[in-house]
Image (spheres, rainbow, N blue to C red):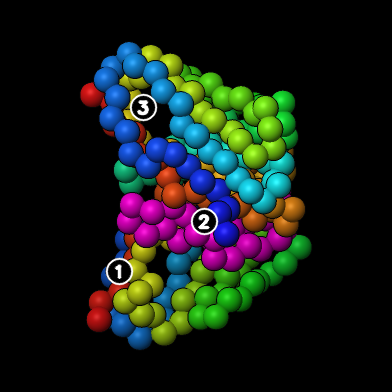
């Protein structure tokens, strides 16, 4: 059972570099989310999608972009990385009952 | 704006104790509330999902209750074990935030001493 798969698990970026965090789910869920988690804090919503071709901003979207060309994939793009984007990023999808399923996370450090 | 608070932030108990974790939310207009477990360096694992029309859900030694009118939920863990040591987060799916997503509390870090 793959569920929600995130890659990479770890990444170090230099300030100003760009990268894409990949997220894929095999449960045919329409709703997908990107959250970030800073030490000792809860999760903050970055972007979400209610289906292929439809995305919307969350609480902390600045510095990020997303796309949703298929039901399965929901990549998160970081442009011009900054130290404030050092965090753990979680992708999730939501089933019909409202239950949320999370990936293992991607730990990003910007130096 | 929905806000979710979890008290206490950390808790240490001896093995075998029954314990209660608290979650409160400011806006009672919710679709559901979900409790998660997070082990260090890992993702979140769903424990229990309570729909707004329900009062409680049970899974093994875990029981979660929901009092929507007072904006509170509790997670009861019976006969705690060292393997229960983790951070427990609650999250609510609100009706009127305009965003169809969960709002998370900061979590309660639980340590069960053998």
Q: Give the mark nearer the N terminus: 2 vs 1.
A: 2
Name the residue at 57% across, 41% down: A24
Q: In this picture, which residue range is highlighted in magenta? A: B29-52
Q: Residue B41: x percent and y percent? A: 33, 52
Q: Residue B107: x percent and y percent? A: 42, 54
- To which chain does the residue with label 1 belong? B
Q: Which residue is mark 3?
A: A85
- Assess disc 1: are there few (<14), some (14-19) or many (≥20) residues with their C-alpha within 10 Å of its C-alpha: many
Vertical placement of residue B106 versus A48, above or below: below
Between A23 and A16, the residue placed more toward the observer is A23
- To which chain does the residue with label 2 belong? B
Q: Quadrant of residue A89?
A: top left
Q: Which residue is mark 2?
A: B90
Tell me whether circle 2 and circle 3 mark residues in contact (CB < 8 Å): no
Vertical placement of residue A44 versus A2, above or below: above
Classify mark 1: helix, strand or loop: strand
Q: Is residue B35 magenta?
A: yes
- Assess disc 3: are there few (<14), some (14-19) or many (≥20) residues with their C-alpha within 10 Å of its C-alpha: some
Q: Which residue is mark 1?
A: B111
């Amino acid at each position: 059972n793959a569920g929600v798969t995130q890659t990479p698990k770890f990444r170090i970026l230099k300030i100003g570099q760009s990268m894409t965090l990949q997220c894929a789910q095999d449960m045919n869920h329409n709703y997908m989310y990107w959250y970030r988690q800073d030490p000792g804090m809860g999760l903050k919503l970055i972007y979400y999608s209610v289906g292929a071709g439809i995305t919307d901003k969350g609480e902390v979207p600045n510095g990020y972009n997303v796309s949703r060309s298929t039901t399965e994939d929901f990549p998160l793009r970081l442009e011009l990385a900054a130290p404030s984007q050092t965090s753990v990023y979680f992708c999730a999808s939501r089933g019909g009952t409202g239950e949320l399923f999370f990936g293992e996370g991607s730990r990003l450090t910007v130096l | 704006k929905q806000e979710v608070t979890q008290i206490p932030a950390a808790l240490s108990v001896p093995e075998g104790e029954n314990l209660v974790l608290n979650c409160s939310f400011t806006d009672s207009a919710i679709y559901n509330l979900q409790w998660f477990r997070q082990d260090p360096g890992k993702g979140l694992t769903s424990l229990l999902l309570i729909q707004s029309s329900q009062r409680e859900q049970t899974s093994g030694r875990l029981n979660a209750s929901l009092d929507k009118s007072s904006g509170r939920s509790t997670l009861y863990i019976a006969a705690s074990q060292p393997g229960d040591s983790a951070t427990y987060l609650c999250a609510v799916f609100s009706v009127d935030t305009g965003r169809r997503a969960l709002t998370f509390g900061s979590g309660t870090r639980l340590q069960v001493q053998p």
